Amino acid sequence: MTHEIDPSFLALPLRALADAALARARALGAEHADFRFERVRGAAWRLRDARVAGSSDTTDLGYAVRVVHGGAWGFASGVDLSMDAAARVASQAVAMAKLSAKVIEAAGSDERVELADEPVHADKTWVSSYEVNPFDVADSDKTGLLTEWSERLLAADGVAHADASLLTVQENKFYADTAGTTTTQQRVRLHPQLTAVAVDPASGEFDSMRTLARRSGAAGSI
């Protein structure tokens, strides 16, 4: 099933920030520069014995500039979404590369970063494979399903307690470099988990069993 990149991510000043950062890096003599902007939204729900014990919904956003200057790597990051701030971050990355070059020289090494030739990928997009974005599902539906699973566990012989949780993540990433590559990506994944606890009424000893499965939709990205 084909999905589009989240419009709210595309509405951010991605290319303008990248242009400002890469232009400053070029002006300062960088042999290579790349810009990454990433937004990660994560939401989680926890149930104890079929009752909601906690939930969270957070979004992290920021960008980074990486350069090769004088044969050394430099890196800096920021969160201010202004063109001047992006340019300053690029300047900081170049300054870090210059410092790294001095450290390498002081160590008596003549090692230099040399990038391998790579094809240019201009204006490419990639979205991970999924049928339904979990963030398009109502919170009540998510907790309702976790509640149903928990109640089924609690109804089983020997089960004294049941824990249920769900983690959902949506990652959006924009990348641009001085070679001309620009890519936009979206990766969605989720991880439900159930734990059943049995307690021996005579001794008070307990044992547990938990579901074991990899996160769904955890394919790699650039």
Image (cartoon, rainbow, N blue to C red):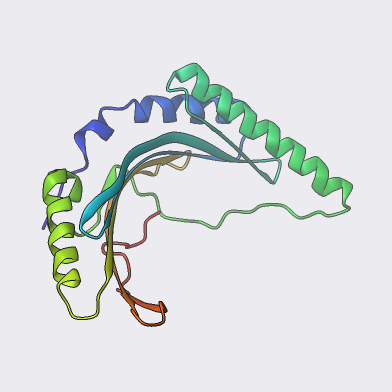
Number of on-image labels: 0
- Position of the N terminus, as image quadrant, is bottom left
Q: Is residue 28 above or below residue 43?
A: above
Left/right of residue 207 with respect to residue 132 in the rendered view: right
Q: In this view, does 136 lie above or below 13?
A: below
Camera-side residue: 126 or 193?
193
The structure residue drawn at horizontal position 21% and vertical position 42%, both measured from the top left corner, is 5
Left/right of residue 200 with respect to residue 102 in the rendered view: left
Left/right of residue 28 with respect to residue 1 in the rendered view: right
Q: Where is residue 52 in the image (x, y as percent from the top left)?
A: 24, 49
Q: Where is residue 218 in the image (x, y as percent from the top left)?
A: 32, 62
Q: Determine if residue 143 is in view.
A: yes
The structure residue drawn at horizontal position 32% and vertical position 42%, both measured from the top left corner, is 56
Q: Is residue 51 above or below residue 86?
A: below
Camera-side residue: 112 or 14?
14
Q: Where is residue 46 in the image (x, y as percent from the top left)?
A: 29, 53
The structure residue drawn at horizontal position 47% and vertical position 24%, both measured from the top left corner, is 20
Left/right of residue 102 with respect to residue 51 in the rendered view: right
- Position of the C terminus, as image quadrant, is bottom left
Q: Determine if residue 185 is in view.
A: no
Q: Where is residue 47 in the image (x, y as percent from the top left)?
A: 26, 55
Res 128 → quadrant: bottom left
Camera-side residue: 136 or 128?
136
Camera-side residue: 189 or 43?
43
The structure residue drawn at horizontal position 36% and vertical position 29%, both measured from the top left corner, is 15
